Image (tube, rainbow, N blue to C red):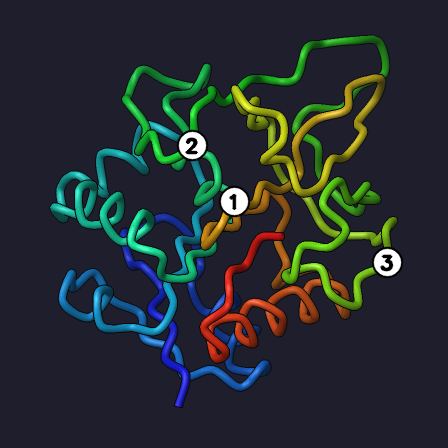
Amino acid sequence: MTTIAVIDYDMGNLHSACKGLQFAGATTLVTDSVQQLEHADGVVLPGVGAFDPAMQHLRSRNLIEPIRRIARSGKPFLGICLGLQVLFEGSDEGTEEGLGIFSGTIRRFSPEPGLTIPHMGWNQLTLTQPDCPIFKGISPAAWVYFVHSFYAAPTDASINAATVTHGSQTVTAAVAQDNLMAMQFHPEKSSSAGLQILSNFVSTVRQGQPVAA
């Protein structure tokens, strides 16, 4: 049995992420228990909302240091949407310090004529780590679903696993490094491509493989 813990910190609808993981054959556990997170085979950090409240909720549940420790332990770890953003050092959206698991900052889209902010709806990925196991079976230009006004700007661009273009701006859509994978888009809302990505994550957890190339 493959058990994936989904971190509960009152920032988003956890049911959709759980449903996608369960469809891929995983047993999900929604929890804020450090012991349960540490004993799970893989961990997912989802999230919808703003950066500062997310970090405040994580702090109020004494989850910041445990998440850092788990993410650096080698356990397969997946961040989704806001769960990607809080993995970085900080955000233009607020003043709270992020988890700092990845070096870099969350930036706001620069205004330009005709650009809609938030970036909301279906858009095409460009895979920059096409051999990344999490993207197995995914088209190099797969359509996925986004809802965001801010994007990750990693210090080390080589961790970018996929990018997306909105207006004239090409920005990070996903990052991957060793056991860590995070995506700005919502795989649970991204039809067959998103379900394949979640299935690939479950497979890497089950096989004890890294999620990144």
Would residue 192 appear left or right of 172 to someone viewing this image? right
- Which of these two is toward me, 186 or 196? 196
- Which of these two is toward me, 213 or 145? 213
Q: Do the CB atoms of the residues marked 2 and 1 lie less than 8 Å apart?
A: yes
Provide the residue designation for mark 2: 102
The N terminus lies in quadrant: bottom left
Q: Is residue 42 above or below residue 84?
A: below
Residue 59, quarter of picture: top left
Give the amino acid at mark 2. Phe
From the top left corner, tell me how far across and down residue 190 is, in percent. 71, 60
Q: Residues within 10 Å of mark 1 (few under 14, many from 20)?
A: some
Furthest residue in direction bottom, as rendered: 1
Q: Residue at x 36, y 79 (%)?
A: 3
Q: Residue at x 22, y 34 (%)?
A: 56
| Mark linked to residue 177 | 1
From the top left corner, tell me how far across and down residue 155 is, in percent. 52, 19
Would residue 119 appear left or right of 207 to someone viewing this image? right
Give the secondary structure at mark 1. Answer: strand
Q: Residue at x 31, y 47 (%)?
A: 72
Give the secondary structure at mark 3. Answer: loop
